[in-house]
Amino acid sequence: MDEEKRITLRLPADLHAWLAVEAKSARRSLNSEIVHRLEAEREAVAAGDASP
């Protein structure tokens, strides 16, 4: 990343808990897990793999 921006993100408690478990199992921080998933989705959309 060339530049980082800080944001405040509100998540439903169950989604936060699920992401935290997924992050821990992948040995990533919660922030890194969210970034990883967003980047993967962006790549899928760019490749035309994501449905609208």
Image (tube, grey):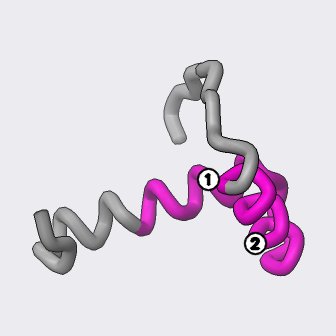
Residue 32: give x, y in percent of width and height: 71, 53
> 2 or 34: which is nearer to us?
34
Residue 10 is marked as none
Check the image and report above or below for 12 versus 52. above
SS state under label 2: helix
Question: Residue sitting at 61 percent across and 28 percent down?
Answer: 9
Vertical position of residue 12 compared to residue 47: above or below: above
Total numbered labels: 2
Mark 1 falls on what kind of element? helix
Whole-angstrom CA distance, mark 2 to mark 1, is: 10 Å
From the viewer's perspective, is 45 left or right of 42?
left
Percent coordinates x, y for residue 24 in the rendering: 88, 70
* Relative image position of residue 28 (x, y in whole percent): 81, 64
Residue 8 % position (x, y) = 64, 20
Q: Is residue 18 magenta?
A: yes
First in sequence: mark 2 vs mark 1: 2
Identified by mark 2, the residue type is Glu
Q: What residue is shown at x 68% (from left), y 59% (from top)? A: 33
The quarter of the picture where the C terminus appears is bottom left
Q: Residue at x 83, y 69 (%)?
A: 21
Pointer 2 residue: 22
Q: Main secondary structure of the magenta part?
A: helix
Image quadrant where residue 50 sits: bottom left
Residue picked out by circle 1: 34
Side of 42 relative to 51 (left or right): right
Tell me if 44 is positioned left or right of 39 in this view: left
Q: Which range is magenta?
A: 15-40
Q: How many residues crowd around disc 2 within 10 Å: few (fewer than 14), some, or many (20 or more)? A: some
Tell me: residue 40, above or below residue 31: below
Taking the spot 58% from the left edge, 51% from the top edge, the residue there is: 35
In magenta segment, residue 5: no
